[in-house]
Amino acid sequence: MPDLDSFIAGLPKAELHLHIEGSLEPELMFALASRNGVAIPFASVEEVRAAYSFTRLQDFLDIYYQGANVLLTQQDFHDLGSAYFARAAADGVVHAEIMFDPQTHTARGIPFGTVIGGLLAAMEEAEVRHGMTSRLILCFLRHLDEEDAFRTLADAKPWLDRITAVGLDSSENGHPPSKFARVFAEARRLGLRLVAHAGEEGPPAYVREALDLLAIDRLDHGNRSLEDPVLTARLAREGMTLTVCPLSNLKLCVVNDMADHPIDRMLREGLRATINSDDPAYFGGYVADNYRAAAAARDLSRSDLATLARNSLLGSFLSDAEVAAHLARLDAYLADTLAEAA
Ligand code: HPA
Ligand SMILES: [Zn+2]
């Protein structure tokens, strides 16, 4: 039987909560800064990593938006995507639904087409190089107003057939889902799926708003839902997928210690929880590291880990036939690893 690390790395899985700007490793940040002649306030890669110490979401966001300033050209976004897909493939990711924050770039004068053009090129390449399928999620920044989100949706019109969903990210407290009810309704009318970050720092009421006012198809984070037993039971009953990010939760102090992480409680409560990396370059690990950290801290069994991987495939926005094909790969993997054990 493979050791737990190899079992996790080999487990066919989907990554459903990944901000592509959050996969910008300090080495690539320096390379792009130099290629583009952009000044960054760090003298070395070590200095960058040392700055990644956060006590709450906003600390991280300030440095994350600053890091994105080095991304200027279509090739930069292509390189960013290629680096992520290669790293994800090594972690057993067979399908990735990647979020991007167009407003972070259009506000600096980078055209929407430059951003999405580079990402789409990396996605096509990932299919050829790694046999990995992928989808795009356009996220609205919730600290900006809804008009700005509407303008971003208008910018996206020429690419709507290449965008699967819209999402909602950035500073949660003070920016409830209700602020974006109209733009989410419009996105739904255009045929897009809907996701939103809720219950990361924000209260359970924000999760309820995301369900009732935005009609989300998937919930990003959702940790604080557990404070409300009626809401928890509803999420379980409705089969809502939660994209949980253990190392992010630790780095942003959503949990004080990995030993307190509720991932196993989520599974026990019947929630369709998944494990994801969120912003791997900033939070100290890619998706397999997140599985490993959660498994070690909460004593997850191989069967729990297989459930988490299965949930990730079931919670994806792929067609039923595509999900079935990925699930068959997972079942074959589990049969093979069990046979080795016998
Ligand atoms: O974890 C997150 N929360 C909110 N916004 C974000 N943008 C990137 N990562 C995050
Ligand atoms: Zn996130």
Image (cartoon, helix red, strand yellow):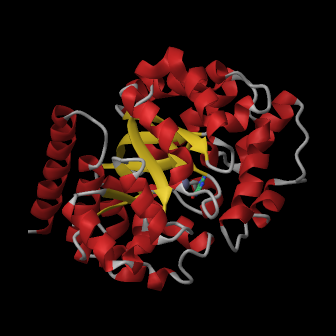
Looking at the rendering, in which quadrant would you find the N terminus? bottom left
Q: Quadrant of residue 311?
A: bottom left
| Residue 221 can be seen, yes or no | no
In the rendered structure, the answer to whether residue 240 lies left or right of residue 148 reads left
Q: Residue at x 38, y 33 (%)?
A: 188
| Closer-to-camera residue (11/140) | 140
Q: Quadrant of residue 97?
A: top left
Q: Residue at x 41, y 19 (%)?
A: 161
Q: Residue at x 33, y 82 (%)?
A: 299
Expressed as whole percent of the image width and height from the top left, the position of residue 108 reads: 80, 32
Looking at the rendering, in which quadrant would you find the C terminus? bottom left
Expressed as whole percent of the image width and height from the top left, the position of residue 73 reads: 72, 23
116, above or below 61, in the image = above
Q: Quadrant of residue 224?
A: bottom left
In the rendered structure, the answer to whether residue 147 lies left or right of residue 34 reads left
Q: Residue at x 77, y 35 (%)?
A: 32
Count how many numbered circles sit on residues in the image. 0
Expressed as whole percent of the image width and height from the top left, the position of residue 267 reads: 26, 72
288, above or below 86, in the image = below
| Closer-to-camera residue (299/338) | 299
| Residue 51 can be seen, yes or no | yes
In the rendered structure, the answer to whether residue 259 lies left or right of residue 240 reads right
Image region (quadrant) for ligand 2: bottom right
| Closer-to-camera residue (98/155) | 155
